[in-house]
Image (cartoon, grey):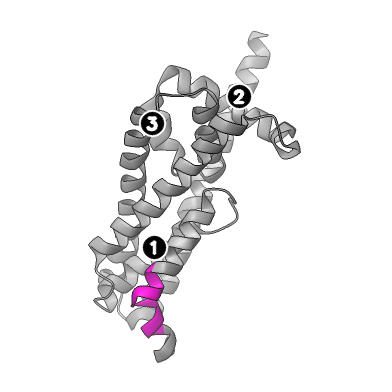
Amino acid sequence: MIPEPLLDVLTGPWGLALMSVIVLGDAFLVVIPGEIAVTALGALAVSQGSPALGVVIAVAAAAAWCGDATCYLVGRTVGVQRWRWMRARRVRVALDWARRRLDSGTATVLFTARFVPFARLAVNLVAGASRLHPPRYLLLAALAATGWASYQAVVGAVIAALLPGGPLVAVVVSVVVAVGLGAGIDLLAARHRRSREVRAERLG
């Protein structure tokens, strides 16, 4: 069982605040598990009845949007070459990929990149550096953040509704599923990137 004091924190306003901080930090530091936090609170929304699932989605979406918008602002004001980490080979590859994808379909790449941690950082930085029209970007980023938050929270909610055993089981299983889904998405993205590089080398 989850200790009662901890459960009180997680199901109250402090739980939402903690989730917001994690999701916001996830926009800049890809090692921070924003998806896990949202999925866990989605599970608690069903297993404990608090916080409400709609509130979890709204708060997570707002935090994700703020993080993405901040990355956009960094790209717009600083660019994508000023700091040393931006010039690392892996980062340059991701930024070049993001630039090509934004040129071919802004809405599509903003929605899909939101589910891939490193990709969403690259896309938001490049969107700012390329001075993508702010109202359009902010609207699309808000829609993408809402879709992402809804998906992550509903995953936790569905697991909690299907599995018996109380909040501990719901949260643990939700976290495992969230990690597995994230790893699967990362693997598919890596395979797709490698296949594109191989095709580019053959054509070159």
Residue with the mark numbered 3: 137
Q: Which residues are magenta?
A: 7-16
Q: Earlier in the sequence, mark 3 or mark 1?
A: 1
Q: CA distance from mark 3 to mark 2?
A: 19 Å
Provide residue 62's location: percent of width, then percent of height.
35, 52
**9 w.r.t. 107: above or below:** below
* Category of crowding for the residue at label 3, using alpha-carbon neighbours closer than 10 angstroms: few (below 14), some (14–19), many (at least 20): many
Residue with the mark numbered 1: 39
Q: Does residue 72 appear to the left or right of 156 in the view shown? A: right
Provide residue 36's location: percent of width, then percent of height.
46, 62
Q: Nearer the viewer, residue 10 or 170?
A: 10
Q: Nearer the viewer, residue 180 or 116?
A: 116
Residue with the mark numbered 2: 96
Most common SS among magenta residues = helix
- In reply to whether residue 9 is colored magenta, the answer given is yes
The quadrant in which the C terminus is found is top right
Q: CA distance from mark 3 to mark 1?
A: 26 Å
Of badges 1 and 2, nearer the viewer stands 2
* Category of crowding for the residue at label 2, using alpha-carbon neighbours closer than 10 angstroms: few (below 14), some (14–19), many (at least 20): some
Residue found farthest to the front: 77
Secondary structure type for disc 1: helix
Secondary structure type for disc 2: helix
* Category of crowding for the residue at label 1, using alpha-carbon neighbours closer than 10 angstroms: few (below 14), some (14–19), many (at least 20): many
Secondary structure type for disc 3: helix
- In reply to whether residue 132 is colored magenta, the answer given is no
Provide residue 94's location: percent of width, then percent of height.
61, 31
In the rendered structure, which amino acid carries the disc numbered 3? Tyr
Residue 23's disc is: none
Q: Earlier in the sequence, mark 1 or mark 2?
A: 1
In the rendered structure, which amino acid carries the disc numbered 1? Thr
